[in-house]
Image (cartoon, helix red, strand yellow):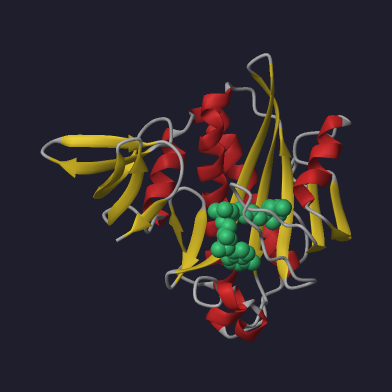
């Protein structure tokens, strides 16, 4: 059963053998007017990217390297919520397809046994303070074997196959992600961020953990207690202080 049960997500779907980055491919299509739900998938990326200029390892045929074109009708401040929504969609789809107990580390990593299996990169293009489009990049290490990772990733990254011991069907997982995404995106449009936030909290490995985060006054630590209505991570730093962490990374202690 290979059917894609979506209306919008994947209504245009393009599979490319090799490209620098599906983010750039999707951006080009979006600039040319590609509709919301356009999906670009590559077998290989030669310049796959993470946040802040970091690189994303994207070997041929071994993962899901995919970008979604979104056209949300909302101000820029809300787009970080879409990062969290995308994480929930991917996490639920991976659980459904593989049964693996994956969890989300704020804001954008999907982890299995403390190692990263998936990263999400949300990029927005703004004009006159209005969001023209967002590109949601999803990178999932699906069938990469341990020894195929470069040295520097071996201890921090893992794949669905490495964790489950079985090859995972990428097409079925892609279909599951697009279906989950479409359902959540509709829920988000109708009811706002609150129901998404509670789904996120339930899948999070960050909530109820001691975390370390960066502030303008240096490193601080505290207990991650939840999300605020904007999607920021709330950290209890003691003595009644709850600090919202808006961007950057948090380290689990
Ligand atoms: C991310 O960045 O996690 C976002 C990654 C988004 C990748 C997708 S693939 C489709 C689309 N096209 C693109 O060009 N990008 C998107 P960040 O939080 O900065 O994490 C990057 C870090 O993850 C790296 O510095 C490595 O430590 C680790 N990493 C790199 N490749 C990995 C892989 N294949 N599996 C697991 N971890 C990896």
Which of the 4 image quadrants contains residue 103?
Answer: bottom left
Q: Is residue 108 left or right of residue 217?
A: right
Which of the 4 image quadrants contains residue 33?
Answer: top right
Quarter of the figure that contains the C terminus: bottom left
**Position in image of residue 126 (x %, y %):** 68, 24
Whether residue 179 is visible to the viewer of this picture, yes or no, is yes
Q: Is residue 224 left or right of residue 166?
A: left
**Position in image of residue 165 (x %, y %):** 58, 85
Which residue is painted at 89% across and 31% down in the image? 32
Whether residue 118 is visible to the viewer of this picture, yes or no, is no
Which residue in the rendered view is the most extreme toward the left? 239
**Position in image of residue 209 (x %, y %):** 27, 57
- In the image, is residue 167 above or below residue 70? below
Which is more toward the observer, 6 or 77? 77
Which of the 4 image quadrants contains residue 242?
Answer: top left
State which image quarter holds ligand 1: bottom right
Which residue is painted at 41% across and 56% down in the image? 203
Quarter of the figure that contains the N terminus: bottom right
Q: Is residue 83 left or right of residue 60?
A: left
Which residue is painted at 43% across and 30% down in the image? 230
- In the image, is residue 229 above or below residue 46? above
**Position in image of residue 213 (x %, y %):** 34, 47
Q: Is residue 59 left or right of residue 181?
A: right
């Amino acid at each position: 059963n290979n059917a894609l049960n979506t209306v919008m997500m994947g209504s245009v779907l393009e599979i490319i053998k090799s490209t620098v980055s599906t983010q750039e491919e999707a951006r080009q299509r979006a600039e040319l007017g590609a509709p919301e739900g356009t999906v670009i998938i590559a077998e290989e990326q030669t310049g796959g990217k993470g946040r802040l200029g970091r690189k994303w390892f994207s070997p041929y045929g071994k993962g899901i390297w995919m970008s979604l074109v979104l056209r949300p009708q909302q101000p820029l401040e809300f787009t970080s919520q879409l990062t969290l929504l995308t994480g929930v969609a991917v996490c639920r789809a991976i659980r459904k397809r593989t049964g693996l107990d994956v969890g989300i580390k704020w804001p954008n990593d999907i982890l299995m046994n403390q190692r990263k299996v998936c990263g999400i990169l949300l990029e927005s293009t703004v004009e006159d303070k209005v969001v023209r489009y967002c590109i949601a990049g999803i990178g999932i290490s699906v069938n990469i074997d341990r020894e195929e990772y470069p040295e520097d990733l071996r201890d921090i990254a893992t794949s669905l196959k490495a964790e489950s011991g079985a090859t995972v069907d990428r097409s079925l997982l892609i279909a599951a992600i697009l279906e989950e995404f479409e359902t959540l995106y509709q829920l988000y449009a109708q009811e706002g961020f609150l129901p998404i936030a509670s789904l996120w909290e339930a899948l999070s490995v960050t909530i109820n953990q001691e975390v370390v985060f960066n502030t303008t006054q240096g490193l601080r630590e505290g207990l991650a207690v939840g999300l605020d209505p904007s999607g920021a991570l709330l950290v209890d730093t003691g003595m009644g202080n709850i600090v919202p962490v808006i961007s950057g990374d948090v380290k689990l202690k």
